Amino acid sequence: MSDAPTFERDLADVPTSAFGSRSLTWWGVIAFMAIEATGFALAIGAYFFLMAHEHSWPPEPWLPPDLLAGTLFTTLIVLSEVPNTLAKHAAEKHDLPAVRRLLIVMAVIGAVLLVLRGFEFNSLNVRWTDNAYGSVIWLLLFLHTTHIATDWADTLVLAALMHTREGEEARRFTDTSENSLYWRFVWLTWLPIYLLLYWLPRWAP
Amino acid sequence: MSAAELARDGPTLHGPELAARLERSWSRDPGLLGWLATVDHKEIGRRYLVTAFVFLALAGVLALAMRVQLARPDQNIIGAARYNEIFTMHGTTMMFLFAVPVMDAVAIYLIPLMLGTRATSFARLNAFSYYVYLAGGMLLWIAFVLNVGPDVGWFAYVPLSGPEYGVGKRADIWAQMVTFTEVAALSVAVVLTATILKQRAPGMSLDRMPLFAWAILVTSLMVIFSMPSVALASGMLLSDRLVGTQFYNPTENGDALLWQHLFWFFGHPEVYIIFLPAVGFVSEITATFCRRPVFAYPVMVMAVVAIGLLAFGLWVHHMFATGLPRVGYSFYTAASMAVAIPTGIQIFCWITTMWLGRPRFDVPFLYVVAFIVTFVIGGLTGVMVASVPLDLQLHDSYFIVAHFHYVLIGGAVFPLLGAITYWYPKVTGRLMSERLGKLSFWLLFGSFQLTFFPMHLSGMLGMPRRVYTYPAGLGLELPNFLSSIGAFIVALAFVLFIANVFLSLRRGAIAGPNPWKAGGLEWATSSPPPPYNFAHVPSVGSATPLWDGPLKWMSGLRVDEKEMLLTTVVSARPDLREPVPEPSIWPFISALALTVMFVSSIFSPWAVLFGLVPLGVALIAWFWPKQLEPTAEPVIE
Amino acid sequence: MNTVQSVFGGQGAEGAQFLSLMTLFTVVTTIIYLLVLAYLALALWRRRRTEHTVESGDHAAEPPPQRTALIGWVALVNTGLIVLTVASFLTDRAMARTASSPALEIEIIGHQWWWDVKYTGADPSQSLETANELHLPVGVPAHITLKSADVIHSFWVPNLAGKQDLIPGRQTDISIKPTRTGLFRSQCAEFCGVQHTHMALDVTVENRADFLRWYRAGLQPAKAPTAPLAKAGYAYVMTRQCAMCHNITGTEAGSHFGPDLTHLASRRSIAAGTLPMNRGNLYGWVADPQANKPGSKMPTLGLEPNELHAVVAYLETLK
Amino acid sequence: MSSPCRASLALAAVALLGGCDREERDSRGQPVTETVPAGATADTIYPGGPSGSTVTLSPKAAAYENNAYHIAQGQQLYGQMNCVGCHAHGGGGMGPALIDDEWRYGGRIEQIATTIVEGRPNGMPSFRGKLTDTQIWELAAYVRAMSGQVRKDAVGARTDEPSNTPPLTQTRREPIVPGEDATP
């Protein structure tokens, strides 16, 4: 390296933040989604494995979970995709005021969802210690609840961050769009679990 | 300052002055706090390596204790309960605390250097993963010292590890240790996947990536898709043992086989997670010491990917004796046989590389030859136990102990020792002694065969696994005695290897940037590399840049801020300039909070809830962005 | 070479099929291994005529003969594996065929660290229960149903056939057709706790006459003791701890938590293979079982010397 | 590198001192003096039996009370010795319930041990001579665990039987003040 090395190109003009798969944190979010998706897939696999052992599902005297709380929860979480997509587009347009408003909305929705989830746990009609059916139902609900809680906490932190001077930073908009992406993943994984918890026991012979 | 006046490397700023300024912005502050706060992948890689080898030594001592107990029939040097603890600790430590982390260690250290980038992605997550791994190892070994060590085997079959027969906290400690090591391994897998996909040097398209990087990419993806299985299984075991769920309770429609399915769905990819990085080592060492790239690069890459995929399809061959339908078994026999094909191809390509090149018999290359000679035996005994009728006789006997030591020590530890000897000059700046290296090599190779080949025979003479003694008169005396003698010589060989490592720290020959005249990018920087790895961004024109003409560079990265270049996934064209996180104490504190939460959750399930508060605070502080001067970067590009 | 506990015995139909398949596998894999070693040796020590290295300038060259050799090698490996897979599948089917016509129904229940063996026939009065021993008539295919009472065990008689696990909550089975007589030893093959090591089973394959003689003797209840010392032992066994766990058919001791002792003295070993059966070992075992098999469910009773002599005397009458 | 090593070694040393008795597996059971006269009475099993002396606070209590191994052995003995026949899985039936804190003859471990050895009127048989000393103390330890008086970390959450009793780790009650006799 005695004299100056030959330079092929100068990278000063290369941008410092971008959206979608060009950003590094996008790959991190995708990898964590893959991990959690595998976890959910295997938990659902365990659900079917244990279901095969029962003559009837849910096994005798136990009733399937009540529909009210679960269905309310599902409708709200699917509807939450509207503000979620708006937040994502606002972030990609660097529209700070819109992002600030929408993150507050998402935080509130998250809180309401967690309360509804409390009622859901109450409406399962089975305790986790009763039998394998109860255990696997509580496992699926517990895993998804940690999923919602972590993303809700992330949304709260992001909302607080966007209200500080830090909010103008380009990278924060990338974080917001990726947080919306992760929320989309949260309710997508909920749909199969909703069917397994609430409807399969009613349809299964 | 506007964008133009920001200091950047290039024709105007290069050489020693640039090095000094980069050194200032990239090095961490000294002292314990600085030590705990580092995010430098080289420092974390070294720590992983040292910690993994400490656990190897500990587990090795346990192996010697087992061999002393099994040297003669009907011995009672070690009691039954203690022996069960020892073989459980030996297996668990080797699999969870040595094999996977040591491959992570070398990968964390080398991948950024091989790809020509300045740091791993998510550097703080990398630091966090080391502390979580260390906490998991300490939990297991402090419990073992306190007579609470697990005694249910390294795969802890239920109901023996269940709430009724797994008495006390032993199996909980094991299950929680699995949670720790799996969080650490998953974090490293995310870090390495993102680094390999997004941070390759400009021009290093996927077909010019080093074979070691391919091996680590496939390994990381296998970790991402297999470790959640053991996380779920050990989580369900913990909840069975602590809050009374019925997952594995046969009388409440749970099933003992649910544990085996979930565990081995992780278990078999796990052994390939240990083996594939070793395939990467062998490819790199063979290329350098035969003075030519490995033969048929695309075939080798496809073989690694094929192993990664097939590994997920054959876990039931661990369960041939559990009475599942025979037709299903024949599918898994075929799948287990099929996984031998890509391995066979790789062996052929390595030997063809030797045929076409001019092999130099230095110590790393000797380990590669020993790998081929030893691993192929293990692979072929693997083909034997893939067949149901044979496995029904050989399963859970010492034949299997011989098989997996051949494929794990022969298949992973030999290449690992070769890799350490090969990259030692890059890490420390000095070469390991060739004479002491050859001595410890031949001692290890010979004593390995003496130790583990007789186990094939003791297995076929009906000696089951995990017995703390065996009766006289079954013909087991000689093979077990030979194994015990061999084990001590293996230990001696390891001691010699470690001695060589420490002696060469000061007395080894000065190595310089490229002592082996190798072709990889890691040999383009100094030994040991500076904290920022490369002063300028190297640009790559072929798979072996240093062998194909002078290296070209790209300038323009910032000097007073830590910055690295992101490139596009397939063709590695420059894409983004990414700031690299500053050293921070918060990953360590988060790991501490996680440890407190995990360990106390063994004693009370409420700890999971209360433990989340400190963990949440620590994570928020970790991710809270550094206050950038707002005008430093133009907001809208 | 021991013939009591070894896969080389091949005294069962399945064991013999295993040996022939194992020989085929060993031959094929050894050939493949020698090919690899030969190619490796040649590659390392051949006289260099042409060399494609960095030093010779054309390190990226990949001459065509090597490519065709690669394709040839893949073809060879594939055919080898296909041959082995098909052979393994055919052997598996052959083994299953012996299971199709069982003539002897046996049920084995695994406990923590001993085997409960029941000969269950159509006629309940002819069903026999014993422990830690298995008698099989030569040439008669036996169908053994395997259950576990606590954790996972594994039933494995290397000389006769492969192993099958005993899993709580599931019922697995294995078919064995012994072809040659002999005394064999089986050992639990799945780690099942502290004394997994001492969970052995004495297997005796004999001709039909001997088997029927043993079977009829087994059906008889235990004879009442005559000698005074044995009578005192009988009194102790019936009124103290022994009756709480063990069953001796024909006496009040009827609990099935411990192994059946009705014909203890006629067995080859004590406590699931822990000690060979003789007077000294009987004394050693009854006096202090925790010394011989630490962690076993049989407690150390702390017998007085006279009680010990009496109990052992009585046990020896249980032929 | 050296200072953190020293710190971790010190930590390990401290941890070494706190030996863990909960996990001690002493299957032999110390050959302790019989707490009750163990004369070889040839009595068959009958309720009540001669009123022996109440048991003094024996040093063995500590060894069995919170020891996971002995409680697990007691759990298996509870099933094998047909305690289930009268007490069911603790809910009681013909015999009194064992998972509440009503103790007719005392709730401390040695009082329960005496009940097992002596037998009690209204149907509790005497197991003197039928079970070894260790087994009796293990049964007493398990009975205490069923009523939630044992540290949660010494007890498994459930047994591998049908789940009719709430998980032992969930039945948390404040322990009976030692010394105060709980007989009504």
Image (cartoon, coloured by chain):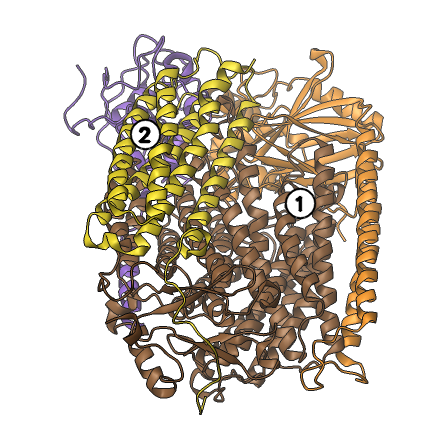
Chain colours: A yellow, B brown, C orange, D purple
User: Residue B521 at what x, y percent from top left?
Assistant: 53, 75
Residue type for callout 2: Thr
Which of the 4 image quadrants contains residue B506?
Answer: bottom left
User: Residue A74 at what x, y percent from top left?
Assistant: 39, 25
C34 and B215: which is toward the camera = B215
Is disc 2 in contact with disc 1, using a CB cutoff of under 8 Å? no
Which of the 4 image quadrants contains residue A1?
Answer: bottom left
User: Residue D133 at what x, y percent from top left?
Assistant: 37, 31
**Left or right side of B592 for C160:** right
> Where's the C terminus of chain A, which quadrant?
top right
Q: Chain of mark 2?
A: D
Reading the image, the residue beneath label 2 is D169
User: Residue B423 at what x, y percent from top left?
Assistant: 52, 76
D89 and C85: which is toward the camera = C85
**Can residue C104 be seen by looking at this rendering?**
yes
Reading the image, the residue beneath label 1 is B395
Give the crowd class for mark 2: few <14, some 14-19, many >=20 residues within 10 Å: many
